[in-house]
Structures are given as C-alpha cells and as structure tokens.
Amino acid sequence: MLNLNDIFETVQMIEQENLDIRTVTMGISLLDCADSDINESCRKVYEKIVNKAGKLVKTVSDIECEYGVPIINKRVSVTPISMLVAVSGGDPVLYAKALQRAADDIGVNFIGGYSALVHKGFSAGDIELIKSIPRALAETTNICASVNIGSTKSGINMDAVKLMGEIVKESAELTKDNNCIGPAKLVVLCNAPEDNPFMAGAFHGVGEPDCVIHVGVSGPGVVQSAIKKCPDGDFGEIAEIIKRTAFKITRMGQLVGNVASKRLGIPFGIVDLSLAPTPAVGDSVARILEEMGLEQCGIHGTTAALAMLNDAVKKGGVMASSSVGGLSGAFIPVSEDAGMIEAAREGTLTIQKLEAMTAVCSVGLDMIVLPGETPSEVISAIIADEAAIGMVNTKTTAVRVIPAIDKKVGDELYFGGLLGSGPVMDIDLKKSPKRFIDRGGRIPAPMQSLKN
C-alpha cells in the first residue's frame, strides 16, 4: 500500500534536494561484429548499436516523464574495442568514429568501451588501441576510453602504466584548444568491473549478456539534507540515517531499471549505488562530510568521514536492489563536486589527501586538473600509486587527471555540464619518479590474490 508520507518525501527529494537517476546505461556485446575487414566490422558495430539502443533515449525519457524522476544521462557501453582490433587490424580510430555516428543517431550522451584490458600484459590489438586513444578522443565528442592496468589477481602492468602516462599527456596536448577535454574522457583503472554504468570507465564485459540495462543512482543532496535534520546525533545515528536514505534512493533506481528492462525487452543488470555529485549547489559529497562536522572537506578527519559514508551507502543500498554492482559507494571527482572545487581552490583539499580518501571510497583520483608542465612519468607514478591501493585492498581504483596545457597552479579549467570546472592543483615536481617508471615489467600480485 502506498504511504502518502513516502510520496511527499520523494517529491521533496526530487524538487529540493537534487535527487536523480544519474544514468541508464545499455551494455551491448560487439563480439559478433568482429571481422577481418575493419570497414565491415565498423559497419556491423554501427548497425548493432543502432538496432539495440535505437529506442533507449525515448524509452528512458518516457519513464522520466511518467514517474517524475529526473534521469540525467542515457548511455551505451560496449565490448572493449581492442578485442575487435585484434581481429580486423587497421586504424582503431575508425571504430571510434563508427561509435560516434551511432551516438549521434541514437542520441545518447556517451558511449564507453574504447577500451583495453591489459592488467597482465598486452595481447593482439591492445597496443594499437591504446596508442590511438588521444586521436580518438580528439576526433570524437561522445566517446569515452578506459584501460585496466592492474588487478588484485594479476598485479600491476608497469609497462602499461608508463604508456598511459604518455597517453594522458598526449591526449591533453591534442585537445588543448578545447580545454584539454581529451583526458576528461579517459580513465585508467585497477580491478575494473564489467558492469559499471558510469563514464568514463564503462565497458561491456565479456561475461555479460549480449545486451543488458544498468542503472546508476545519485543523491548526495538527499543524504546531506537527511543528516542536517540530526545536528547532534552520534555516528551510530548518522550511519543509520545514511543507510535509510540510501535504501530509498536505490529503490528508485531499481524501479527505473525494472521498467526500462521490461519496455525494451532487455535483461536488467545492476543498480550502481554510487553517490555521484555534480557542480550544482546542494549536490556535493564534500558537503555531506562537512555536515558531519568537518569545517571543510580535506582537513584531518575527512578520510574517516568518507569511510563511514561509503560503508553506510552500501549497507542501505544493497537491501533495496535485487542486484547491486558496478562501483557502488561515494564518488569524489574534484571538478564535478561544488564542495570539493571550493576546498581545492582554498588549498584545503590536496592531491595527497585525495589519494588517502581513495582507499575508502569508490573509484579514485577523479577529474583532477594538473599543471600543464607535469611530466608523463609523474602521471604514470600517480597511476601506479592509485593502482597499488586498489590491488592491495581488492577494490576498484582509477585515475582521471587532466594536464592543463599552458596553465599553472591556481588557473582554472572549464569543461561545462556534469564535468564542471576546477582549479589547477599543486603537485610536487621537485623530484622525479622517472627511473622507477622506466623499470617496466609487472608488480606481482599481492598475497590477497591467493584465495583459491
């Protein structure tokens, strides 16, 4: 039976507290599009995406109108394109352009999956795909790329780490006349999940069905508002409030996923529980942490507050969905979070503190703007550090950093939309990790990998 109080509460969450469904993402397998002729393969890729996802945007928009729930992004994720390159050879950017044509025709915000999985080494197609990423991102607008360079089971591919530092820097250079947007659509992962609906790290894993619907929820503003109503509660009470709130947010995601699945005739996959912030006022993970009692995000105590938030979100959300997956937790993308932007501008939030925070939250060093002079080996070292946190803690971590070409600490880089804007953050460049990065090889898997 419907409870009027629950209905009124949900309406308030949507109208006043920025509650939304951040994304409905359709995963599509392209394995049957592989062909020794790259032009034929690209044709099959385009046709399959348009055939499977042609009604995605309209269907999700109809659900949005009928249920009054804002659904911000409609997206597609595909099989890692390096697997198709292995069969067809040729210029991988042709695949990026085929994906872009499909994105234009079906109207989705992003297509993710211009990706390679190289955590244990490079196989056919991987090197070609990775080296083409800067051109692919410069010559398209809606394509996202990702590379998985490590895992708890395999260790860290340091040859790939070195290469990705160079790729990030090159991608920034090629898009410097467009606010260095290239690296904002590129993420380097450790322990990448196969069912992630969030960009830029989304790809359709080989263990997934031929086609599937995933949902990513949001709602930092709702959590902040709930905590604000308990100004004197202890941490046990705060944790309970977060759990109850996460349950309500996730139930909405489950509803949208079920309805979209039924109308599209495609299996429902997972709900990703992640609290995904935006640059909008009142939609910030940083503000949640400050509502707990921190004067500003980034001061001592921030990591502990974030750990509790992440855990409570998972505990509340997992009871509300038949299938939870993806990343699930709290995101801390600097340029996409109004509170973190402010803390970074004031110098309270540093890269060192952000790295510590990544040990207890979803993903990792996300949407951080670096000085344009940052060498590629420093970017590689940042990737290696973050991958080590993920590998040892058996969790997904990632790096999405943007070298702001020709800009220095304190300057601003503006992306617009959900990507927001952010200050160029200070980074220690006095000493170099180049000799360390140049060693190459593979950092062996930790003891945690021996679970069989």
Image (cartoon, rainbow, N blue to C red):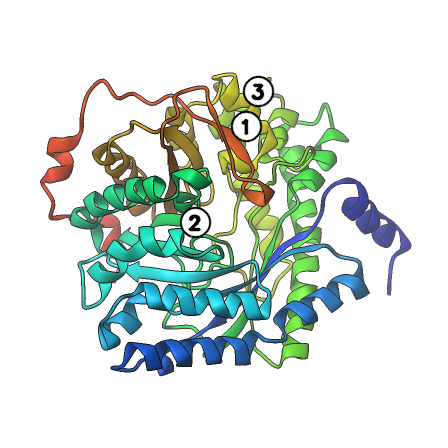
| Contact between labelled residues 3 and 1, with CB atoms less than 8 Å apart | no
* Closer-to-camera residue (444/451): 444
| Mark 1 and mark 3: Cα distance apart in space | 11 Å
- In the picture, the quarter occupied by the C terminus is bottom left
Residue 70, percent across and down? 72, 54
Mark 3 sits on what residue? 296
Residue 90, percent across and down? 24, 70
| Mark 2 and mark 1: Cα distance apart in space | 19 Å
Give residue 341's mark. 1
* Closer-to-camera residue (192/1): 192
> Going 67% across and 34% down the picture, which residue do you hit?
237
| Contact between labelled residues 2 and 3, with CB atoms less than 8 Å apart | no
| Mark 3 and mark 2: Cα distance apart in space | 28 Å
Q: Classify mark 2: helix, strand or loop.
A: helix
Mark 2 sits on what residue? 185
Q: Is residue 369 above or below residue 166?
A: above
